[in-house]
Image: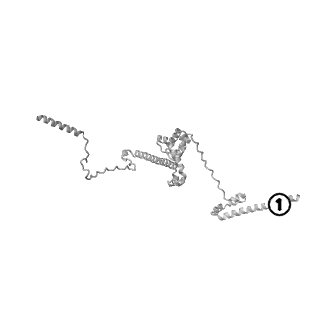
Amino acid sequence: MSNKLIAQGVQGLEAETAQRATRVPRAADATRDPALPHPASEPIPAAEPASLLPAEFDVAGIGGLDTLAQIERLEDAYRAADRAEGASFQLAKMRGSVAKGELIRLLLDRNANVERGMSVGAYAETLGIDRSYVYKLMDDAKNIRDLTQLIDETQTPIIASQAAFLAPLYRSDPEAAGLVLEGAKATGKLSLASLTSAAQDLGLVPAAPEKRTPEPKPTPSKPTAEMAGQLSFADAYRALAPRRIEELVQEDPDQVLAQVKLIESELARVLRRVETAKKTARRAMSASSDQK
């Protein structure tokens, strides 16, 4: 009889153990009386914000190299930083142009300026946009957006001025536009000038005409006593220009006065001949009238 009771007790313990093993664990505050104040839980520490600054260059990593090798590594790192800075600047400008251009288009599509009781230009100025730039801003956004595939494939930010040149070419010949972009990047600096040059090299746009250096204008010679008697009326007129005289008198006013008197004397001779010619013409006219 006692063995039977012991066996039943063992079975009961085993069943209780199995039942406990399958139960969902109780919450830590399961026994807390909800009527009592609940102790504040420990605050979760906030994650450290990521630094906006780049990590310092790992000088220890080049410590085992000779001085020249260290310099070369540092120069390579500098060039990489320079490229990264340029790409970051280009990327920010490109994104800004697209976002602003598309947003102003959406606003004008909804007659935002009319709702505000303003002209398009006046409304644009409330957004900090020069009124003459409104429609260009929208065109810039469209040009850049049309180059989406090329930008994504080459991972190259393209700003508005560059897109204005490249987008029309891309719409007509995407492959050619890709070659132009590749050629411009090969120069080491992507710019409107390098894009234009690459397109000219490929014969896609006319080459710029060669700039010819203008020939220097001949400097008028100063009037001298020797040449005063040979001056024509036009020469004398130019030689006596007020600004020219003002410059010359700073050097030698006495000499200028002497030269002017020589010119005056020559002009007096011309006037005498003018008077003689007038008299001869009048006599001829008078004789012609008498014959009639």
111 with respect to 16 (left or right): right
Judging depth in this view, the residue of 265 and 52 nearest the camera is 52
The image quarter containing residue 273 is: bottom right
> Mark 1 — residue?
282
The image quarter containing residue 237 is: bottom right
Q: Residue 286 at what x, y percent from top left?
A: 85, 60
Image quadrant in which the C terminus is located? bottom right
Label 1: how many Cα within 10 Å (few below 14, some 14–19, many 20+): few
267 with respect to 67 (left or right): right
Which residue is located at x 67 percent, y 63 percent?
Answer: 256
**Is residue 123 among what the camera can see?**
yes
Q: Residue 38 at what x, y percent from top left?
A: 27, 52
**Is residue 230 among what the camera can see?**
no
Which residue is located at x 18 percent, y 37 percent?
Answer: 12
Q: Residue 245 at what x, y percent from top left?
A: 66, 62
User: Residue most toward the left?
Assistant: 1
- Secondary structure state at the residue bearing disc 1: helix
